[in-house]
Each structure stands twice: as C-alpha cells, then as structure tokens.
Amino acid sequence: MGNRFQVQDRYADGAQYIGGRLRPGTSGRTQDIVNPATGETVHSYELAGTADVDAAVDAAREAFPGWAGATPGERSDALHSFASVLAGQAADFAHAESLQCGKPIKLTTEFDVPGTVDNTAFFAGAARHLQGQSAGEYSGDHTSYVRREAIGVVGSIAPWNYPLQMAAWKVLPAIAAGNTIVLKPAEITPLTSLMFAEAAKEAGLPDGVINIVNGAGRDAGERLVGHPDVAMTSFTGSTPVGKRVAEIATATVKRLHLELGGKAPFVVFDDADLEAAVNGAVAGSLINSGQDCTAATRAYVQRPLYDAFVSGVADLMATVRLGDPFDPSTDLGPLISHLQRDRVAGFVDRARSYATVVTGGEAPQGELVKGAYYRPTLVAGAAQDSEIVQSEIFGPVLVVLPFDSDDEGIALANDTPYGLAASAWSRDVFRANRATREIKAGCVWINDHIPIISEMPHGGYKASGFGKDMSVYSFEEYTQVKHVMYDNTATVRKDWHRTIFGDRP
Ligand code: NAD
C-alpha cells in the first residue's frame, strides 16, 4: 500500500471490525470522515447501531475463554509480534492519523505512532508480571494467596484528540491481562483504531479479542456501557459525558474507569529559568493544537517574571508556523473540526469583554482559510473565576495570570474542578518539591510539561476522573483480585467455631 493511505478502498466493506472482519454498520446513518485541514470528505461510512454493538460483544464474549486461558507468555508473544507489525506500518499510521485529525506529520511520526509501538512493547513485557501479595500463612491456620484474574468483556469509549494512542491505552492493558474488548472510538476519527485492530490480527491475535464499533455516543456508546455482558466500562472523554457514562454503568453495577477533562496549571516561580518556562509554555499549550487533556492552559507567573513571561510567550507564539499537516515544516495544524474551532473562538471572543487578547484570537486567512485553523492565542488579565480560566477550551489558547506569594500560586493552581496534570517551574528544590506535594493532580512535572512514558501512570484527580492508563497501575483497573484460602489444620472443629458452638465437644 506504500505510504499513501487509501481509505476508500480499504474500508469499502464497512468500518465496523467485529470478530476479525470488516462489515458495514446497521444504524441506517452515515458519517463523513473530514480532513480538517481542507474541509474535504475523505470517506463516508455507515455508523454502528445497537445491533452492531451486541454483535461485537458476542464476538468478544466468545473469544474470552480462549484468550483468558492463554498463558501470560503466550499473550506476551502475541503482543511482541503486534508491536513489530505496528512498527512496520508506522508511516501508514502516521499518514492516516494526520489525515483524519489534521495533526502535523512530525507530531504523528515522532509522538503518536512511536508512543503506541512502545506502549504495545511495554504491555508485552508487563503481561508476564502481574503483581500481588505473596502467598503466606497470615492467619496461622491457613495458606492464603491472591489470584489476579481477567474481568471479561471490556467496553471502552475513546475521544478524537489522540485516536491511535487512546485505542492503545484502552486496548493494551485490557488484553494483556486476558480480557477481550469492544472499543468505540470517536465516530469522526475511526481510521487508526480500525488499523490497530487489523494489525493485531496480522500479528496473530485471535479474532474477537479486539473489536471496533464506530458509532455515535448516544446509541452505540450508551448500549456498550449498559450492555449486560460487558463487565467493565473504560471511558476517556469530556467530564459531562463521563457523568452520563457513570450513571449508566452504575445502574448495571459495572467496574468503571474514567479519564476525563483537564485544565492544567503551569506555575512559574520567580527563581525559574524564564527562557525555559517561556518555551515550555508555548510548546505545552500548543501541542496537538491545544487539544490535549494535559496541555498547559493556565499559566500562573510570580509577579517579578510576569511581564517578561507575557512578552516572551507572545513573541514565541508568533513564530509558530501554521500550515499543511503533511508539510514536515508545519508546527501547528488545524483543530479537529470547524465546529471545534468555532467553539474555541467563542471562548476567546467572550473573554474580550473582561480580558486582553495579547496575541492570536483569530483564524488565519489566505490559503488556510478552508481549514479549521486558529492562531496561537495568549489571553491576559482575566479573573480567576472567569469562564476562560475555569472551563476546558481544548484549543491553542493559554491564559496567563500573576501571583505574589508561593501560597497563592499553589492555591490558584488548585482552584478549578479538574486535576489531571500540572507543572511547576523553579530552580529551588524545596519549592518544587512543595508543588509536587500540594498540587492536586494525577501528574506534576517539574521544569517541563507534557512528556508521558509507558512505565508511568496517567490519570486524574477530582473531576478529571479516576483510574490509571499505561504502566502496571492500569492492571488495577483491568483485573479483579481473588483471595484464595486453604485450611491447614485438617480438623473438623476449627478454632473459630467456638463463636458458634462454645466449648461443647
Ligand atoms: P466527548 O466526551 O464528547 O466524547 C468522547 C467519546 O464519548 C466519543 O467516542 C463519543 O462518541 C462518546 N460519547 C458521547 N456521548 C456519549 C454517551 N451519551 N454515552 C456514551 N458515549 C458517548 O469527548 P471528545 O470531545 O471526543 O474529546 C475531548 C475530551 O476528552 C476533552 O474533555 C479531553 O480532556 C478528554 N480527554 C481526556 C483524556 C484523559 O486521559 N483524561 C485524554 C484525552 C481526552
């Protein structure tokens, strides 16, 4: 197939991957896949309906006993092969991800795809290292041990901002632990999740272990969450939809893992390396056009550095090159859709009445006018309780506010409902260490913002959800722990029976 990804040919038979083969959806509705850099439709497909979800759950249920019964070594071997197949198709994956999301090709080539290959290789190793307490005679009269068991069919729902990485984060820990899965990607970005599942088949994973249903949230999504044969729901997306998912999952008493929205603070103390902080703020707020749940969104800068930080960030943002995602020199692509671009512009336009737009705040004209582009934007002078400081914008927009004392900086950083990620910038080890202790977020970076790594957990505090993706911590979500206890006394009357029989013989 070469480097050019031929979507229409490849998905002519449909965009639902169930039991190891592609088929059309039966909802009766079609969905366009649009290249947001041009507004052109790349492909149209039939969305999954509830019957397709049921078929995918059946396929996953059928595959479960065989896959759960494989040895950890067998699952590990399959995942190692999977990582090799993915690595061999890296260029196709990067191309498809850039096409459906508008991400610059250097981002998909250097971040999305190698991150996914590394995650797959990590879970190939981790599959052989499920942890638990050691067996022992804890009561004195029994031997106790722990079994860490697969849960069954996992139903996962993913967002559009990193479709390939989200598919990997959902699928890999689930199947490494012996579960089977039905994944519902965001319906506007189905391509790389399908390719991921197809690559798994090529690597030898059995049919039915990974199933992909591309459908809308309100029917296919809700059916997947409420399905009686789905043992666990794992959801990544916005906090409002996460609340709806939690209601449905709770009604069916499911295991639940929620990775929700973020509004990451970026706290610059007055002893920080100013140039490093300026560079970090621009890169950390603009990655993936700001459509990143951990992106730097609120910069709090201690008063002595404030003015220099604002002008430094504005100057550097103006050098960022917007352009064709497939041009290797492009730094910033469009947003995911014109709808999302208009949503982002709405936040900035409303902020003009109470804050200052220092740079950006508009869509570029000229040859980019057809795409969903928005210029890198810096907003200053907004109050802490204003919409632009409190709400998740999910676009290339950074808000900057000053603070005086360290206490104030940390209090402001904690003052939103979210708690996914944060960074603190200082050369003072005590200040930095205090920030790591007191900022309430699932990840705190010191003197950097954004990097993730397969070995380390990713997940939120507060309204950003609960549970961890990546790392061995994800097995806490995707396995259930059973205590097994053997009597060692071989007696009829156990010691504790006295509570029933007293001292009677
Ligand atoms: P979204 O919540 O609108 O949609 C996410 C997924 O949920 C999609 O697949 C959608 O089809 C589905 N969905 C929608 N309504 C549903 C319903 N009623 N029942 C079941 N499923 C439903 O989010 P989005 O706009 O696709 O993605 C952006 C959001 O995702 C942001 O809030 C971002 O912070 C969050 N996000 C979080 C993380 C994390 O790790 N915490 C990672 C990436 C993105």
Image (spheres, grey):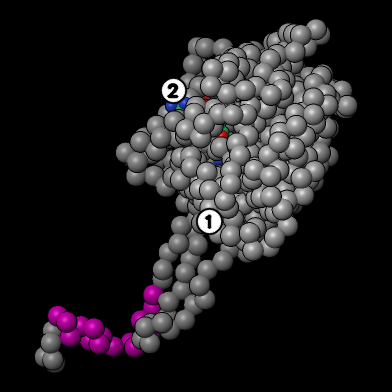
Amino acid type, label 1? Glu
User: Whole-percent x and y of residue 219?
Assistant: 44, 23
Q: On the rendered image, what quadrant is the N terminus found in?
A: top right
Separation of disc 1 and disc 2 at Cα? Answer: 41 Å
Would you say residue 409 sits in the magenta stretch? no
Q: Residue at x 70, y 60 (%)?
A: 428
Q: Which residues are magenta?
A: 485-500
Which of the marked residues, 1 or 2, is nearer the chain's N terminus?
2
Q: In the displayed structure, would residue 74 be above or below residue 118?
A: below
User: Whole-percent x and y of residue 374?
Assistant: 70, 18
Q: Which residue is mark 1?
A: 438
Circle 1: element type: helix
Would you say residue 498 sits in the magenta stretch? yes
Amino acid type, label 2? Asp
Q: Which residue is mark 2?
A: 219
Q: Residue at x 75, y 23 (%)?
A: 333
